[in-house]
Structures are given as C-alpha cells and as structure tokens.
Image (spheres, rainbow, N blue to C red):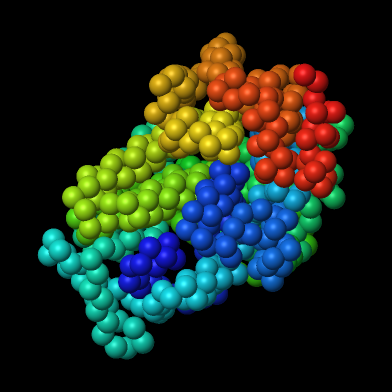
C-alpha cells in the first residue's frame, strides 16, 4: 500500500487465499505505535484505527481481535499444583485502560482486510500463485510459477519477500543459513480452540490484591523448564494456544503427534488442564519442527527480505511484529527518498545489516530466557531488559525523539546496548543461587538509565502497572520536561476521561 501511495506500480502475490489462519497474532505497544506512524505518514487512514483496541472496536467490530492489556507470565515448577503463587507471577501492563490497549490480531480476518484494502488502494493482486523460480539479471527480477494450472511470470524492478522463514527467495536463490547465537533448537505445536475458560474464572492464579489488569486480557505465558505455552483469547470465542519447547522436551512430548501431544502438555500443567477442560479444536494442530531461522543474506540488488522472512527466533515476547514493522518503515522510507538514485543500493545494504543485527540481539535475549525457564527469578529479571528497552523506545518516539531509540532492544545504544549484551551472556550461564542473585542485581543496574516504567520498583513484587508518575519521574532520561510528558500523555489518551480532563486528572494524581 505504501509503495502504491508513492506512485510505484505494485503487484501483490499470495500463495494461498484469504481468509486463512497463520501464526503470529499478538501485537505490542511498539508494534501498534509503528503501525500508527506508518498510517499517518503515508495517509493510510483505514489502518490507523487498527492500532488501538478502542478505535478498532468502534471502527471495525467485524474484524475479530483480542484485548491485550499486558504480558502475563506464570511459572510452573516441577510437581506444582493448585493456583500459581504470587512469587511465580510476572504481570507487566502495557496500557492503563482498554481504550488504548493493544490487540491480538485474528489473522484470518485481519490479513483478509489488509489484502482487500491493498486492492482498494490500486494494488494488483493475484492469489493461489505457486512461485517456482526467480531469475535476477541485475536489472530485473523475473518471478515464474503457476496459478490455477496456467503459467505466470512477473517482471519487477524490485521484489520484497514477505513469505516468512525459509520462504520463496531464500529457497529460490539458495541463500543459506547462519546460526542464531545463544539460542537452543526449538519446535512448536499450536492450534485454535473454542470453549477455553479464563484463568481468572478457574482460580488458576492466586491474586493477592488487585492486579494491574485482568490477567487473561494479555499475552499469557505459562513457563516451565524446557518450554512455555501461550494462550491468546479473541473476542469471537476463539483462543490461540500452543507450546514452544526445546528439542529435548519436544521429543519427550512427541509434539509431531499433534492432539495426543497437546494432551500430554495439559497433563503436565494442572492449571492449563482445568482451563482447557471443555475446549475443542477449531483448526487442525500444526507442528513446526524447527522455529529458529536466520538467512545468510537479507538483500540483493533487486530484492529484499522483510525481517519476518530474514529470520525468526521464537514467539516469546511477540518480537516478530515490531521487528517486521521496523523493516517496513525503513524500506518505505528508502522507496520514498532514495528510489531511482545512487543512494538506494547503499541504503539497502544498511537495511540488511540492521535487520540482521536486530535479529541477533533478539536471539541473545530469547536465548537467555530459555536458559532460565526453570529459574523464574532470573527469567523475570531478563524479561525486564526487554520491557525497559521497549517502553523507553515507545516513549521516545511518542515524544518526537526517535533518534534516542533507533534500534530494536536499544542494541546499538551507546551504554545500554553493550551492558545488556553482557548481562544476557551472564544470565545464560547462571548455575547457582549466588550467581542468580548477582545477575539479577546487575540487570536492575543496567535498566535503571532507561527505565521509564517503574520496573526497578521492587516493592511492586513483579506486578507492574502503567503509572503516569513513573514517566514523569523519568522525564530527564529522555531529555524531556514535565510538561512535555503531560502533553504526550494527553495526546495518546492516557486518561480514560475526556481529552479536556486528562491534564487535570493526571496533575491531581501525580505529585510534583
């Protein structure tokens, strides 16, 4: 759509047909902010409303999605039963109320809407295309394949591949693979279900006091040694759930057996067994024998892989969406400013380098989390490195200071980037209680300069709300004033009150 808006002739090729179910469903605050920025910059008004739960529901209630107020983590030690205790919980809020909350994208509806919208914008669209070859003569890329029994050939000056890990161009051009540093080999099994109960209805988590948001209105992670289970609930009665596991656990559970393997997963975790007691599958189980992937090349003279096609680490923390939307934003800017100039080729190389560097940084983070799936205090602390970087980046962008957070996970930040890398390396090698305590202390020290969300407040006991006071106290970390923070909060709808009342309410709630 952006390329079409910029005056280029665009054709969109789809292997399947819409609607169809695919994995990758849970957005994040940074993802939605990037979507909003792209919609504003390139005049895609119909997409802007999809960046928040409230505007989505008022503008497109027919497109199914789920309410995501935060990230819920529940740890299940070996042999545990009964409600998950407070010390085995990590709740990180992403919004103060439903109106500006994030969403889970029900991809069957969401992707079909995007494809229709692209056609409305004038993009040529062909579905059910099975591509076979790509011939690149240095000036033109020629894609050839079959559509409904007829030969198809498309000649293009530039090709963007969004076909996912080990996708079309990776196979057609024989690009090869590089290792993802620090991450174990993992597999996945997932499906969609009906009849899944809410965790707060089953009493599966011990809630001492008022949690920062309803625990099921979130990306819910059930964490245990060797793997984790996600549960994402949509407003149409469908729940997405699946497991990602190290190879050893995947083999033990025999994930390739589908439904039988899922039953074995539920037997291991009584809380989930109760939640899925009356559940029925509405889609066949899908087994992915290898999750991790990193392409050895990201671009050529006439083509580029989106980050989603250049590599994938794990669905943990929903990092795929912000990585890919950052890639979309960078490619869009190149098409806008450098297309048909001598600057395009070097910018493309820069795009490839940044895409790969951010993938590697994500792999380090996920690797450290996997290393501590059985050590929840360290797992929780490592998670805070992600939440600190993400909340800082989001706030910087909302303040009009994107240069403060130009990379995912702030991996090239002059101080946080290198210190985060060292902390992740230490966390991945923890072998004792003393080492655990030391690395937790180090992580709290590392996040302090970029912590704008009160993540260093240990009195919260791993329940982190979205609190205006945290942002106001951290204004200096972003080079901002108190008034600039208040104005930003008013712009983004922080208060659930009418816009004219926002500043008054915040100033009443937050001491100077």
- Quadrant hosting residue 282: bottom right
| Rendered image quadrant of residue 76 | top right
In the foreground, 112 or 179: 112
What residue do we see at 35% from left, 55% from top? 336
Q: Nearer the viewer, residue 410 or 309?
A: 410
Spot occupied by residue 236 in the image (x, y as percentages of width and height): 72, 66
Quarter of the image with the N terminus is bottom left
- Residue 195: % across, % down: 76, 64
Q: Is residue 431 above or below residue 141?
A: above
Which residue lies at the image location 80% right of the left edge and 43% below the top edge? 500
Q: Work out which residue is located at the far left of the displayed protein and give it.
A: 137
Which of these two is toward me, 417 or 265?
Answer: 417
The percent coordinates of residue 2 (x first, y second) are: 42, 62
Say whether residue 184 is visible.
Answer: yes
Left or right: where 353 falls relative to 248: left
Residue depicted at 44% across the width and 33% down the height: 403
Where is residue 95? Give x, y as percent: 71, 41
């Amino acid at each position: 759509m952006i390329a079409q808006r910029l005056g280029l002739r665009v054709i969109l090729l789809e292997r399947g047909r819409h609607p169809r179910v695919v994995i990758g469903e849970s957005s994040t605050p940074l993802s939605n902010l990037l979507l909003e920025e792209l919609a504003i910059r390139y005049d895609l008004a119909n997409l802007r409303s999809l960046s928040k739960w409230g505007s989505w529901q008022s503008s497109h209630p027919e497109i199914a999605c789920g309410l995501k107020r935060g990230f819920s983590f529940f740890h299940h030690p070996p042999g545990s039963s009964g409600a998950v205790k407070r010390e085995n919980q990590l709740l990180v809020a992403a919004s103060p109320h439903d109106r500006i909350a994030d969403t889970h994208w029900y991809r069957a509806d969401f992707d079909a809407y995007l494809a229709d919208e692209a056609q409305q914008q004038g993009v040529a669209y062909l579905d059910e295309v099975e591509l076979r070859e790509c011939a690149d003569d240095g000036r033109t890329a020629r894609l050839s394949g079959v559509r409904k029994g007829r030969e198809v050939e498309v000649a293009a000056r530039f090709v963007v591949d969004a076909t996912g890990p080990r996708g079309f161009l990776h196979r057609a051009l024989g690009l090869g693979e590089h290792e993802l540093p620090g991450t174990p080999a993992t597999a996945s099994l997932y499906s969609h279900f009906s009849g899944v109960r809410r965790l707060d209805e089953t009493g599966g988590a011990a809630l001492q006091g008022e949690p920062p948001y309803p625990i099921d209105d979130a990306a819910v992670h059930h964490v245990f040694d060797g793997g984790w289970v996600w549960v994402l609930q949509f407003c149409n009665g469908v729940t997405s759930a699946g497991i990602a596991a190290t190879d050893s656990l995947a083999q033990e559970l025999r994930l390739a057996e589908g439904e039988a393997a899922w039953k074995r997963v539920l037997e291991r975790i009584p809380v989930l067994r109760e939640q899925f007691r009356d559940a029925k599958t509405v889609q066949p189980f899908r087994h992915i024998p290898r999750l991790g992937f990193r392409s050895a090349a990201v671009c050529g003279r006439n083509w580029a892989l989106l980050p989603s096609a250049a590599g994938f680490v794990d669905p943990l923390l929903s990092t795929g969406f912000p990585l890919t939307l950052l890639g979309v934003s960078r490619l869009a800017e190149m098409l806008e400013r450098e297309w048909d100039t001598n600057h395009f080729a070097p910018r493309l190389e820069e795009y490839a380098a940044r895409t790969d560097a951010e993938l590697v940084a994500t792999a380090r983070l996920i690797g450290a989390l996997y290393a501590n799936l059985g050590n929840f205090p360290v797992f929780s602390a490592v998670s805070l490195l992600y939440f600190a970087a993400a909340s800082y980046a989001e706030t910087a962008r909302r303040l009009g200071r994107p240069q403060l957070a130009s990379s995912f996970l702030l991996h090239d930040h002059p101080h946080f980037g290198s210190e985060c890398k060292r902390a992740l390396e230490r966390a991945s090698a923890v072998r004792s209680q003393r080492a655990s305590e030391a690395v937790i202390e180090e992580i709290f020290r590392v996040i302090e300069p970029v912590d704008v969300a009160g993540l260093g407040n240990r009195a919260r006991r791993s329940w982190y709300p979205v609190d205006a006071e945290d942002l106001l106290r951290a204004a200096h970390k972003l080079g901002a004033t108190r008034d600039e923070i208040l104005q930003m909060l008013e712009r983004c709808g922080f208060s659930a009150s009418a816009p004219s009342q926002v500043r008054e309410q915040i100033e009443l709630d937050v001491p100077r």
